[in-house]
Image (cartoon, coloured by chain):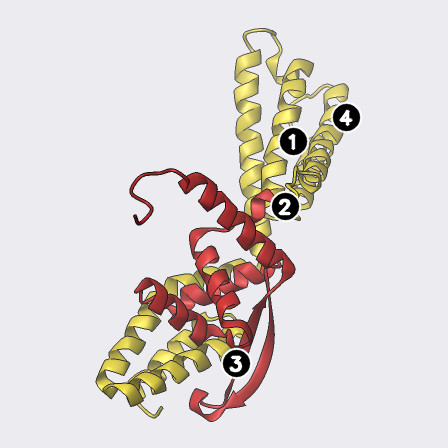
Chain colours: A red, B yellow
Amino acid sequence: MKREDALGSLEHIVLLAVMRLGANAYGMTVRREIESATGRDISIGAVYATLMRLESKGFIRSHAGAPTAERGGRAKRYFRTTADGESALRTTHEIIVKLSAGLKGLHHT
Amino acid sequence: MRDRTLQVLNWILSRIVPVTEREPLLGDLTEEYELRASEGSPSTARQWYLRQVCASVASLLWIRLTSIAWISTTAVALLAYIAVGVVELIVNEVTSSVSANAAYNPLGMLITFPMVVLIVYFAARLRRNAGLVLATLMLVSVTAMTLWGAESVPLWYRIAYFFAGPSATLVGSVLRRFRPTGEAR
């Protein structure tokens, strides 16, 4: 993984949410997944800004879905992680595991 | 969603969101609003919608600005150009204690060169084409100074200056391409 492409904390969370949601990852579900996991009412603008950044780094890809009535006739934009995105997640996870290893108070007994 | 307030909020958001994100983002907000209104009360859903719009404005303005690539590239190049000017001033001040004619000192140029390379390296990391814009800015300013500058500048210095700036931007841009990378496992 390129050093400059290391994940920021929100990028990390959004990328994990996209990966968890699989084929059903689009703006609203990503936002709700993060909200249910963190308890934070994250804004849709912040989610989209992060998704765009991740896409420009090549960590996710997007494609348009069909318009639906409950969305006022607007189409969804689905996201999925790329091989580079999954590699970035693994690297970030390894860093967190290494840095937190042996630290008192971080692990449940 | 027929609520007048929500229509106004949608209109405000649609002015801020980049065109490519407008339809999916407004669709996502509408879908969740409808979901919340059906699960709870419409007034709670409306308050949530208002909070979402207010909280999204800063992020959306930022992606709108950064999506205009040439503006941010030019801004980064201009900042780098200013940084190069500051470095030259400092180096001239320092070398003035060594040489009587500090302004046209080869030592100053030798010290400045790697610093310009470093500045271009970081500028090109922020924006890939910033080095190219900076090189153009340097060539234009050197040409203008050569043609219309009132100060008498030695010929060797003019020639060296003409090549030094663009060469430094070229080296900085090339270094940015060959930056160290870690092997992904």
Q: Residue A4 versus residue B21: which sits nearer the camera? A: A4
Q: Are marks 2 and 3 on the same chain?
A: no
Q: Which residue is mark 2?
A: B130
Read off the chain for label 1.
Answer: B
**For discs 2 and 3, the disc positioned in front in the rendered view:** 3
- The quadrant of the picture occupied by the N terminus of chain B is bottom left
* Sequence-first tag of 4 and 1: 1
| Residue drawn 51% across the image and 49% down it | A92
Q: CA distance from mark 1 to mark 3?
A: 45 Å
Q: Which residue is mark 3?
A: A76
Amino acid type, label 2? Ala
Q: Which residue is mark 1?
A: B117
At which x and y percent is residue A85? Answer: 58, 58
* Sequence-first tag of 2 and 1: 1
Residue contact at pointers 1 and 3, CB within 8 angstroms:
no
Amino acid type, label 3? Lys
Read off the chain for label 2.
Answer: B
The secondary structure type at the circle numbered 4 is helix
The secondary structure type at the circle numbered 3 is strand
Q: Are marks 2 and 1 on the same chain?
A: yes
Is A6 drawn above or below residue B117 in the view shown?
A: below
- Picture disc at residue B159: 4
**Pointer 4 local density, CA inside 10 Å: few below 14, some 14–19, many at least 20:** few
Image quarter for residue B88?
Answer: top right
Is B30 drawn above or below residue B79 in the view shown?
A: below
Q: CA distance from mark 2 to mark 4?
A: 24 Å
**For discs 2 and 4, the disc positioned in front in the rendered view:** 2
